[in-house]
Image (spheres, helix red, strand yellow):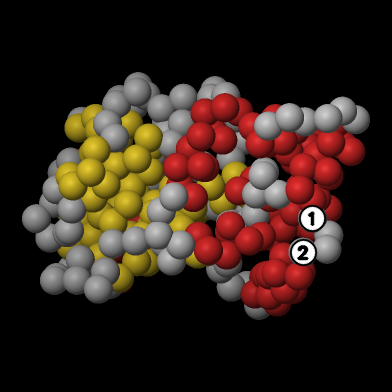
Amino acid sequence: MLQIHAVKAFNDNYIWLIQSAQNQDVLIVDPGDAGPVINFIEKNDLQPAAILVTHHHSDHVGGIRRLDDLYDLPVYGPQREHIKTVDTPLYAQADQLLHASFAHFRVIDTPGHTPGHISYLIEDNLFCGDTLFAGGCGRLLGGTAEQLFDSLEKIKQLNDKTQLYCAHEYTLANLKFAITVDPENPALLERLAHTEALREQGLATVPSVLEEEIHTNPFLRCDNIEIKKAAEAYAGQPLDTPLAVFSVLRAWKDAF
């Protein structure tokens, strides 16, 4: 099985290192800062094989040039975003072989946070950047609510045991918003208590599991009647579609 290592960066970023089941080769996902990655690689005698990028924001790409200069790596990233350090643009496609040490990847278009955001699926592990967070979703920073809603609906169709490797430790703040929207949800109440306990110990709350997100993340539950009622109460008007509910939730979270 793959080993997946979390490297902390900045205040709340996670840079994911995907280690081959066969050897010490690692794929580096969204290295916003090279220093912590280099330290982890050298400490654990790992061999960088490639860099995978989900989108263009600096906290996801800022360390690429230094890593590439040091290790001479192929850099994969979204075809629809202009990232100077990406030398192999990718578009949505199943069964892409990015390196001989790893199984085939599926690249999924997940725009919304940014217009060209992509995610990487390997062996029921989704590296989803800033599209889906544990308990929440990304802000609209160039993309549209419709794009992000469609991207989340796409993710919902994956195996419900899929492990979700988002790029930030935002879970507690997200769940505090979620409980405001959905205060009677027992699964959400339990998740919030568990998350608070983890954070009190300084422990990570990601990856999460898609099945849990479907039951507790309001942004994946826009067809739920209680979520709809809460969004309508906030908006002060009827909302006819799940997309309309999602758009209100996203604006509500921005102001929360």
Q: Is residue 86 visible?
A: no
The residue at which mark 2 appears reads as 185
The kind of residue tagged 1 is: Asp
* SS class, disc 1: loop
Callout 1 environment at 10 Å: few (<14), some (14 to 19), or many (20+)?
many
Q: Are marks 1 and 2 in contact (CB under 8 Å)?
A: yes
Q: Mark 1 — residue?
A: 182
Question: Does residue 38 appear to the left or right of 88 in the view shown?
Answer: right
Q: Quadrant of residue 212?
A: bottom right
Measuring from the top left, give residue 11's x and y in whole percent: 59, 53
Q: Where does residue 228 sit, x and y in percent of width and height?
A: 77, 42
Tell me the tag on residue 125.
none
Kind of residue indicated by mark 2:
Asn
Q: Position of residue 132 (x, y in %)?
A: 53, 47
Residue at the spot x=66%, y=36% of the render? 242
Which image quarter: residue 196? bottom right
